[in-house]
């Protein structure tokens, strides 16, 4: 690239035509030498296999440094010289994913199924993870299946493979639509107008929440709209929940819904979880996640209604409240915990302000400790917070 750039400047009259080209780096010199050797090496010969292995090593280093386009070139050359080089093929597939050429990546996964006897299962496991995060479930299943064929037996990968196969079995013909900050996937029973309405509503909600947190999503957020509750039953989502966030925003769409108005609260709630997880680097406790997500969806509990909302037995401490969110919840218990967490957030807003609440979340990520963030921004320990909330709420 340096030599080509200097040549162009010289032609345009912006550089000294007599200037010497920039010296090659050791890596560039090594690649040039390998290219010269490759010109006289027949494919599949011992010499070609040796050159292939050396190009693969350099391509792997480029991939690790984030030079994915260069990695595609080098790993493609490596595999072209030796089609038995399963390492080169696996890394080439991952490089195509990194440059977002998903069709080429899918082709090379299937090429591995047909041609490669040995390859690192870990690379195909990573490919599966990437595809699953993009909600390209058939590609994820193909990549994880190839990892298994190559000997991979990681229990986490096997669970994710089984889960993806199950979702494909219950989800009918998902299609997608992309907006500036979201990619919406939906089953066939979910109408195109509803998908478009959800995308518009999410962009509006996102502008508001992004301003509150003072942060933007690191990448386009995947949202999945399911007709009915077949997937939610598969994933053991309680029947009182209409949405869930697990890295993707998943929403159950009741039959007949055609506008995002009916889904606005759940979309705001789950998007709040996505932003909180990112901003706090997963450092916020469950009660704050649920309390703030409710608050950002617009839910409020007047103090006069709080005792009725919580019921006769509030949690005995902030630790007990947090432990409740880690257990299986029936509807009455969930109602109590969610009401408490929302009311504590309302107390923080009333006594410290919205800005302090947003700072607690962001500083939990910066400092790596929610306890320190709460102390520095609100001047309270968790136990002090809970005690003062109970006095304020009179519960």
Image (spheres, rainbow, N blue to C red):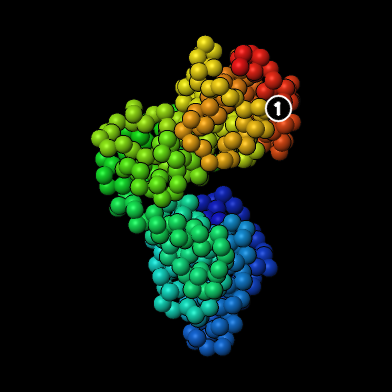
The x, y position of residue 83, in whole percent, is 48, 79
Q: Is residue 257 above or below residue 221?
A: above
Residue shown at 59% from the left, 31% from the top = 287
Q: Quadrant of residue 27?
A: bottom right
Residue lying furthest bottom in this view?
45
Residue shown at 63% from the left, 40% from the top = 281
Q: Quadrant of the C terminus?
A: top right
Q: Residues within 10 Å of mark 1 (few under 14, many from 20)?
A: some
Looking at the picture, tell me which residue is in the foreground, 73 or 339: 339
Which structural element holds mark 1? helix
Looking at the picture, tell me which residue is in the foreground, 144 or 161: 161
Can residue 59 be seen? yes
Q: Quadrant of residue 345?
A: top right
Q: Quadrant of the N terminus?
A: bottom right
Residue lying furthest front in this view?
312
The x, y position of residue 116, in whole percent, is 47, 78
Query: Which residue is tagged 1?
Result: 382
Residue shown at 40% from the left, 45% from the top = 232
């Amino acid at each position: 690239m340096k030599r080509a750039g200097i040549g162009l400047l010289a032609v345009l009259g912006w550089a000294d035509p007599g200037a010497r080209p920039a010296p090659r780096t050791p890596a560039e010199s090594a690649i040039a030498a390998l290219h010269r050797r490759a010109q006289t090496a027949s494919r599949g010969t011992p010499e070609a296999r040796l050159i292939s292995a050396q190009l693969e090593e350099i391509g792997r280093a480029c991939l690790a440094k984030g030079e994915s386009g260069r990695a595609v070139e080098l790993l493609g050359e490596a595999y072209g010289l030796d089609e038995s080089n399963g390492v080169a093929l696996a890394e080439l597939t991952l490089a195509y994913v990194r440059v977002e050429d998903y069709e080429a990546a899918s082709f090379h996964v299937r090429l591995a199924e047909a041609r490669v006897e040995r390859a690192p299962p870990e690379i195909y496991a990573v490919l599966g993870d990437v595809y699953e995060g993009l909600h390209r479930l058939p590609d994820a299943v193909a990549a994880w299946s190839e990892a298994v064929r190559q000997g991979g037996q990681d229990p986490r990968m096997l669970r994710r493979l089984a889960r993806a196969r199950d979702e494909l079995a219950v989800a009918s013909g998902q299609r997608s639509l992309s907006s500036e900050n979201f990619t919406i996937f939906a089953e066939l029973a979910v109408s195109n107008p509803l998908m478009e309405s959800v995308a518009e509503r999410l962009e509006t909600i996102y502008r508001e929440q992004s301003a509150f947190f003072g942060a933007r999503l690191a990448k386009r957020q995947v949202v999945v709209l399911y007709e009915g509750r077949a997937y939610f039953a598969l994933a053991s989502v309680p029947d009182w929940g209409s949405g869930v966030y697990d890295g993707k925003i998943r929403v159950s769409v009741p039959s007949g819904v055609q506008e995002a108005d009916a889904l606005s609260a759940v979309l705001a709630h789950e998007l709040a979880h996505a932003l909180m997880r990112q901003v706090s680097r997963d450092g916020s406790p469950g009660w704050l996640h649920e309390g703030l997500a409710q608050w950002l969806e617009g839910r409020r509990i007047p103090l006069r209604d709080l005792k009725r909302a919580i019921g006769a037995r509030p949690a005995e401490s902030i630790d007990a409240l947090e432990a409740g969110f880690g257990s299986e919840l029936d509807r009455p218990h969930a109602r109590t915990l969610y009401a408490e967490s929302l009311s504590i957030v309302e107390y923080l807003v009333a006594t410290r302000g919205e800005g302090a609440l947003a700072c607690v979340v962001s500083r939990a990520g910066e400092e790596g400790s929610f306890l320190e963030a709460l102390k520095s921004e609100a001047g309270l320990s968790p136990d002090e917070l809970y005690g003062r909330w109970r006095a304020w709420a009179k519960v």
